Each structure stands twice: as C-alpha cells, then as structure tokens.
Image (cartoon, rainbow, N blue to C red):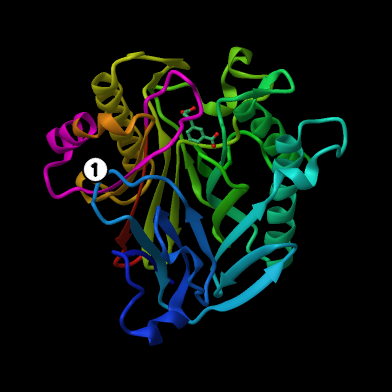
Amino acid sequence: MTLALLTADPAPPARMRLADRILGGALVGQGSCAATTRSWPVQTVVAPRLDSTREQLQELWQTDADCESGEFAGIVFRRNAELLYGVLQLAESDFAGHADCPPLQAASKEAYRRIFALLDAQALPQLWRVWNYFADINRESDGLERYRQFNIGRHEAFQACGRAASGQVPAACAIGLRDGPLNIAFIAGRQVPLAIENPRQVSAYAYPPEYGPCSPTFSRAVLVSLPQQDILFLSGTASIVGHRTVHRHDVAGQCRETLDNIAAVVDEANRRGQTAFSMAELTYRAYLRHGDDFPLLYAALAERLGDEASVVCLQAEICRSDLLVEIEAMATHPVRSR
Ligand code: 3EB
C-alpha cells in the first residue's frame, strides 16, 4: 500500500479513472471551485493564498488500491484495506446551550468522539494526522481563548474514548480561519505509527498550565512504516523553544526558528526510523498571520530549502497570539524491502 500527495492547480486530475484510487483531498485557498462535487471527501480550507496568483489549489491523496466511500455520523470518508481519509464539519451553533461548556469545546469533543467511533468500527484504529480549522482561534469567549476551549474538548474525547492523550498521539495542526464551522480532516490506518518529538521543544501534551487548562493533544510528527513506503507527517511547527514563543514581533526570526525546529524533527525522525528524509524533499503548507510578511517567509524558505521547495502559503491565524507563522509538511519515501 502506498500514499502520495498530488496537487492540481486548480483543475481535477485529467484521467478520471484514477479517481478509484483517490482517498480524498483538500481545496485550499479562496475561489469558485468549492461547490464542485467530487466522489471523494474534500476538506475546504478557505483562506487567502499568498504563494501564487492562482486562488485555489486542489490537493489529492492518491493510493495504489481501489477505495470505497462511506458516511458515518456526518463524517464523509473513503478507505481501502490499510488507509482511511475523512472530513467532518460541525456548526458550533448546534452546540449552543448544550451542556455547561462553550459550544466550541462541546463541538470539538463530539467531533473527536465520532472520529474515534468511526475508526474503531472500520477496524483502522490508528489516527495518524489531523487538520483542525475553526473561526476566531485567538478570540476569548466564556472567559477562555477559543484555542484553549478546543484543547479541552479534544482532550476530553481522547480520554472518553480510551485513547492515549500523551506519547502515542497523532500529528496535527490547529489553525484559525476567518469564519466557518469546526472543520476537521484526518488520515488514519491500521499501522501503529512512531510518534516523534522535538528535542528542542517541550512536548505539546506536556506544556505547563500557562498555555491553558488542558495541553494540546498532538505529537511533533508521526512516521508511518508501510511495507513499501515510509510516510512522515510533520505537525504544524512554530517559533517555540522549550515551551516559550521566541522572536516575538520578528517574523523573519520566527521563520528561521520554525525551520530550525522542522530540521530538528526531521533529524529525530531519521534517527528513530529507517529512512533518511531531507528537508528539501518535503511538501510544505505554511500559514502567515499577516499576508504582507510573505516576502520575508519566502526569503527564509529559499535560503533554507532552495528555490525548488514545494510550499503552499495561506494567510490565517495561528493558535498563540504571539506566533506569526506556522509551517507543516509531509513526505513519502519508497522502501525496497523490510
Ligand atoms: C505549537 O507548537 C504550535 O493544537 O493541534 C501546532 C500544531 C500547534 C498543532 C494543535 C498546535 C497544534 O504549540 C501550535
């Protein structure tokens, strides 16, 4: 079994027979394609695109075996024997007045409970990588920043479903968009991945309480070893050393520190796994709080990765109000024999 990330800028793949082998995908940016129906689950990430004059990018997860589609508790998913990709959107308004917690917390808990129920029912229980988006991530409501509300709901679901909330946890990102529902996509499978941490950073699930009553439930990266392929999913990575934000108000400094953190996570993955990933071969998605900072991000990326790097960049909000940039990445490597 193999997985590949394809990008079509912005048209769907020309040879539609490939559609049988597409697990799902994402439409990234702002544009008019959003309403087009596809025969696979699509996460729509509506945010201004900074890296290209094209408004919208289509990303596809292509595999090498035919896939089947399904729906479960509002989750649209597609799977084959080893892999599952799903997308779920929950309107926070449906959780207003519900329980004695903020709607976003209740929606986050419910979303993750449904995801775990689906994965258990499909017997593909390992959650590898999660993309979390919601509106106004830094706004305070009910006396707590919304990102912190999300962390509580997510953590409660991991616990309620008997899942480890530290150590063996998925790679993730959590990004603020201008509006829209709680919008989650995920890749899961049968294989237990290797959770990778960053020696330069405190693990997110062990952050001290100054960052919120409940620590974020994600690992810095996961390394999945399939029989024919190693897959590395790098979580959203930012300018954090130890547990503290560094280079406040200095976007160029934050970009360089973020790339140092990515280099450290890649080194750690290479030390723990059997594949040598290089930073230059990763496919990146970057988020900038201020669109005007794109030239500075581009310069930092070019200095580090050369001009050939594959980077999609969006203007979006980062989960700490003092963070100006966050970068995530993935790569696959064929494996000859195990
Ligand atoms: C950080 O390192 C920056 O809550 O799922 C990065 C990736 C971040 C994932 C999440 C948050 C998340 O803490 C923020």
Instruction: Tell whether position 313 is magenta.
Output: yes
- Residue 267 location (% of width, % of height): 30, 36
Q: Which secondary structure, mark 1?
A: helix
The number of numbered badges drawn on the structure is 1
User: Which residue occupies 54% across, 75% down?
Assistant: 80
Q: In this view, does 300 lie to the left or right of 31?
A: left
Picture quadrant of residue 249: top left
Q: In the picture shown, does residue 305 fall above or below 325? A: below
Provide residue 189's location: percent of width, then percent of height: 56, 61
Quadrant that contains the C terminus: bottom left
**Residue in the foreground of this view, choosing between 287 and 29:** 29
Query: Which region of the structure is painted magenta?
Result: 296-325
Visible in this render: residue 329? yes
Write the residue at 58% across / 62% down.
Answer: 86
Is residue 54 or residue 231 the one in the foreground?
Answer: 54
Residue sitting farthest toward the bottom: 17
**Percent position of residue 38, x then y:** 50, 74
The residue that mark 1 highlights is 279
- Vertical comparison of 134 with 125: above or below: above
- In magenta stretch: residue 65: no
Taking the image as drawn, is residue 162 in sight? no
- Does residue 211 appear left or right of residue 275 in this picture? right
Mark 1: which amino acid?
Answer: Met
- Tell me the quarter of the image containing the N terminus: bottom left
Quarter of image, res 269: top left
Label 1 Cα neighbours within 10 Å, binned few <14 / some 14-19 / many ≥20: some
Query: Where is 142 relative to 21, above or below?
Result: above
